[in-house]
Amino acid sequence: MDAGVAEILNAVEDSVRGGAISPKDADVLTEPLARSLAAEDMRDPLVRQIEECVREVGGPASSRSRAAALGERYRGLSATDRAHFMQVLAHQFGPDPKAVARAQSAYAKAIGTPAQWDAETALRQAVVSPRSRLLRQFNELPDGLKFLVDLRADVLRALTRAPDLAVLDHELQNRLLSWFDVGFLDLRRITWDSPAALLEKLIDYEAVHQIRSWTDLKNRLDSDRRCYAFFHPRMPREPLIFVEVALTGELSGSVQPLLDESAPLLDPGDARAAIFYSISNSQSGLRGVSLGNFLIKRVVEALHRDLPGLEVFSTLSPLPGFRAWLDTQFDAGTVPIKAAALSALAEHINAKPAAALLQQTLQRTRWSERPELIEALRVPMSQLCLRYLTQAKQGIYPLDPVARFHLANGARVERVNWAADISVKGFNQSYGMMVNYRYMPQEIEHNVDRYSEAGHIALGPELSSS
C-alpha cells in the first residue's frame, strides 16, 4: 500500500476514534481510496484469478475449470510466490466486516421476534468468507482434497514466519475436520503384497522407528506383524495415519527384538499380546485432525475379531520429552532421586552415590555396551521415568505428548522399560526409556472420564504398588 494512502487511512481512523467525524462520514472519505486500492490489487493476475473463481464468473463449470488452473499454477509457484498466494487468501478474501456488523446488529434487534430466524440465517451468510468458495471449488476437483491437505501443510510451515496466516489455517482446519470425519474413512491392512508405491510411502512416512531397507519393511509386514492405515475415498493411494503392530507371546519391554530381522516367527494363533510399537501421521496438513485415537480402537476391534486368543493390547511407546526434562533437572541440581537407588551404580563405578554420578554415567560412558551398567541403572532410571510421567505436568496433564495422547484415549501406564530403545534416536530423546500404555476395554471409559476431569493418570498394578 502506498505510504501516503496509509497515512490518510490512519488519520481518518484516528478521527473516528476521537469522535471528530462519524463512521458514516469516514466511509465517504475512504471509499474512493478503497476503490483505487481494489483496482491496484486487480492488476495482480493472481488476485484477478482468485476473484473470478470466488465470483463464479461464467457459472459453476467455468469456475471449476478456473480453480483447477489456479491449483496447477500454485503447485508450480516458488516458495516466495506461494507465500504471496497465502497472504492474498488470508487478507483479501475474508468476510466483509461491514456486512458482518450490519447482520449482527440486525440479528440483535430481531431476537425474540418472528424475524429472528431470518436474521440468524443472514448473519451466518455474512460470516462466510469468499475464500471458502474457492476452497470448496478445490475440494470438488479429482485430486482437490489432497491439494487442500498439502496447502494447509504449506500454511503450517509458514505460520512461524507469518502468524497473520492463522485465519487461513483455522478455516482450512475446520473444513478438513469435516471432510476427514472418521465415518468417511476406510481401515485397510497393508501387507507385503500391497502396491509398491504404497509400500514406498510407508518407508517415507515412518516417523517413530526408521525403516532402514526393504528387508526391514518386509520383516514389519511378516505373518506375525500387522500394519493398518486409514484411507479417505478421495485419497485412496495416500495413507493418512498408520500403525505397526507386533504379535507376541507376552507384553514386550524392548523394541530391539521387534525390529530384529532375524528373530524367529511366531504363529499368530499362539500370540497373546498385540504390541502397537509405531504410530505415524502421514499428512502434516492434517495436524489437529484427530485420527490416532479412532485408529487404535478400530485396530483393536479388527485384531480381536481375527485373533480371538489375544489378551493384551498395549503400546511400546517413546518418551520424546524425557531426556530434555531430566537434563534440565541435572543442570538445576534438582534430580529427585535418593542415594539408595544409586547404590548399585556407585558400587560398579566405585564412587559416592549422587545425581552427578548418574549424569556422568549416562552422558559419558558407553553404558549400552556394558550389561552390568545397564542393570545398575535400571532402578534409578525407572524411578525417574515414573516421576516424569506422573509429576511433570503441562497444566493438569502430563508434560509428555505421547503420554497425553494415550491417557486421553483411556489407556493406563502399565510399565516403564529401561534400555528399551538403545538406538541413537532412543538415546537422544529418552536415554533409552520406553513405556507400555495398555488398553483394557473394561477400563477405558472410566479412565477417560477421570483423566479429562482432573488429569488422573491410571497406573497398572506393577506401578501402583511401587
Image (cartoon, rainbow, N blue to C red):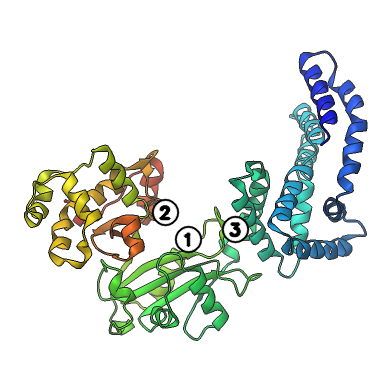
What residue sits 25% from the left and 54% below the top? 363
Query: What crowding class fits label 1: few (fewer than 14 Cα within 10 Å), some (14-19), or many (20 or more)?
Result: many
Name the side, left or right, on which 386 lies relative to 447: left
The residue beneath circle 3 is 285
Residue 179 visible at all? yes
Residue 440 falls in which quadrant of the image? Answer: bottom left
164 relative to 29 in the view: left or right: left
In the depicted structure, whether residue 36 falls above or below residue 28:
below
For label 3, count other residues whose C-alpha is less than 10 Å away and answer few (under 14), some (14-19) or many (20+).
many
Judging by the rendered image, the residue that carries numbered circle 1 is: 292
Query: 3 or 314, which lies in front?
Result: 3
> As rendered, which of 215 and 235 lies closer to the eye?
215
Query: In the image, 318: left or right of 198?
Result: left
Question: Mark 1 vs mark 3: which is more N-terminal?
Answer: 3
Element at badge 1?
A: helix
Per the image, label 3 sits on a secondary structure element best described as helix
Q: Secondary structure at mark 2?
A: helix
Q: Residue furthest front?
A: 364
Splitting the image into 4 quarters, where does residue 108 fall? top right
Residue depicted at x 8% and y 49%: 351
Gap in angstroms between the C-alphas marked 3 and 2: 19 Å
Comes first in the chain, label 2 or label 1? 1
Mark 2 neighbour class, 10 Å CA radius: few under 14, some 14 to 19, many 20 or more: some
Disc 1 residue type? Answer: Gly
Residue pictured at 79% horizontal, 48% vertical: 130
Check whether the beta carbons of the residues at disc 3 and disc 2 lie within 8 A of each other.
no
Q: Are marks 2 and 1 in contact (CB under 8 Å)?
A: yes
Can residue 412 be seen here? Answer: no
Q: What mark, if any, has residue 405 been given in the picture?
A: 2
User: Nearer the observer, disc 1 or disc 3?
Assistant: 3
